[in-house]
Amino acid sequence: MNLASPTLGILGGGQLGRMLAMAAAQLGIRCHIYAPERDSVAAEVAAAFTCAPWHDSQGLARFAAACSAITYEFENIPVEPMKALPAHKLNPALRALEVAQDRLKEKRFIEDLGGRPAPYHPVDSIEDLRTAMDRIGTPGILKTRRDGYDGKGQWRIESRRDADAIRLPNTGLVYEGLVRFAAEFSVILVRGADGEIRFWDSAQNVHADGILATSTLPPAPVVLEQVADARALAAKVADTLGYVGVLTLEFFATADGPVFNEMAPRVHNSGHWTIEGARTSQFENHVRAVCGLPLGDTSLTARGIAMRNLIGDDALSASALLADPANHLHLYGKAETRAGRKMGHVTRLEP
Ligand code: AMP
């Protein structure tokens, strides 16, 4: 990328785009946000904003012409219109989006690489669901193949009676056996344009109602024992996809080793602690990677790190959080507070 007047285009206008744009600004890189919603917390901190639908081919062409490199911060962007973007400018490549957008494709991809997802069965009808329960047993979780996030598009199935009562949505689904895990953790890596891979330390993640609540380092010993295997799989995913940028894989640490949960072809909520807790944050390294710049040091700046999400009304305690000098507070500037909505996060370091 030409560093004389670089502009990084970001598809998606949420808090991940906002934090990417803030990291880019530190490197003198301007960001141009492309998002369909007028209210964009990323556009507020960016140099330019195209507010247009994903399928607006002219809007996308003008956006691409104005950018020296393009990335995305949201994995549910429709892939088809993005194929018109110049492939040499776009990272991670669209193949990563195609895999990550479909839970079934993603699980098969991971199995092909030698990884182990939770036991699963595709479901397109109530008969399929019964077969899935016969094969895998209950309890389990029925998930939409596409467009699910933060626990949306998921139904817990305790028994066959739940399955009889359910009205299946008119979309492809997958049934997963409930994994008995000792802990959850994520592997976050950055892969540069030259294929170099760097990992951040793995945080232990706790979810509440399907939404990430906390990420803590160091993680429990069971996680530390399983990180090497999980990293090997994540590196294989990145190499196979010819991936450039930050990639996240989420795992369950079980008695039989790491079980793959899902991947995100982007910076991730469980890596927000890297802003203060690592020498180079996931946001800065993503910007560096997709702009073809050298990668930064991913090592820790503290021994103990705790990130807590501020969800819904949690953000009302902002001034109390600011009163404690140990807190690093991040608010995303969202105008409307809603239950279950990520409004910000707070990170604490223990030297
Ligand atoms: P997901 O959106 O699929 O990552 O699910 C969100 C959270 O729900 C996970 O991080 C887990 O805490 C829980 N969860 C999802 N799938 C399973 C599973 N098959 N077994 C146990 N817990 C699960």
Image (spheres, grey):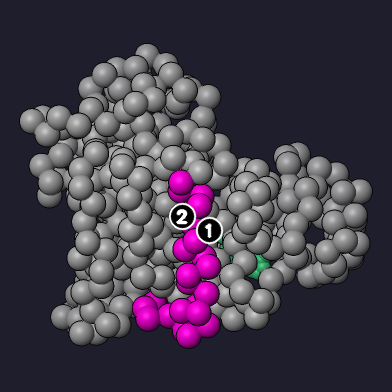
Quadrant (top left, top right, bottom left, bottom right) of the N terminus:
top left
Asked if residue 19 can be seen in this view, the reply is no
Disc assigned to residue 320:
none
Question: Viewed as shown, does residue 213 lie left or right of 310?
Answer: right
Task: Give the quarter the ligand 1 occupies.
Answer: bottom right
Task: Name the residue type under label 1.
Answer: Leu
Residue segment shown in magenta? 214-239
Quadrant (top left, top right, bottom left, bottom right) of the C terminus:
bottom left
Q: How many marks?
A: 2
Q: Position of residue 45 (x, y in %)?
A: 20, 44
Q: Which residue is mark 1?
A: 233
Is residue 88 magenta-colored?
no
Residue at image coords 23%, 46%? 288
| Magenta part, dominant SS | helix
Q: Position of residue 116 (x, y in %)?
A: 65, 61
Q: Are marks 1 and 2 in contact (CB under 8 Å)?
A: yes
- For ligand 1, tell me if the residue under mark 2 lies within 8 Å: no
Residue at image coords 41%, 48%? 266
Question: Viewed as shown, does residue 236 lie left or right of 1?
Answer: right
Is residue 215 magenta-colored?
yes
Q: Name the secondary structure under disc 2.
A: helix
Q: Position of residue 5 (x, y in %)?
A: 10, 30
Residue at image coords 69%, 63%? 118
Q: Which residue is mark 2?
A: 235
Residue positioned most to the left:
4
Task: Name the residue type under label 2.
Answer: Ala
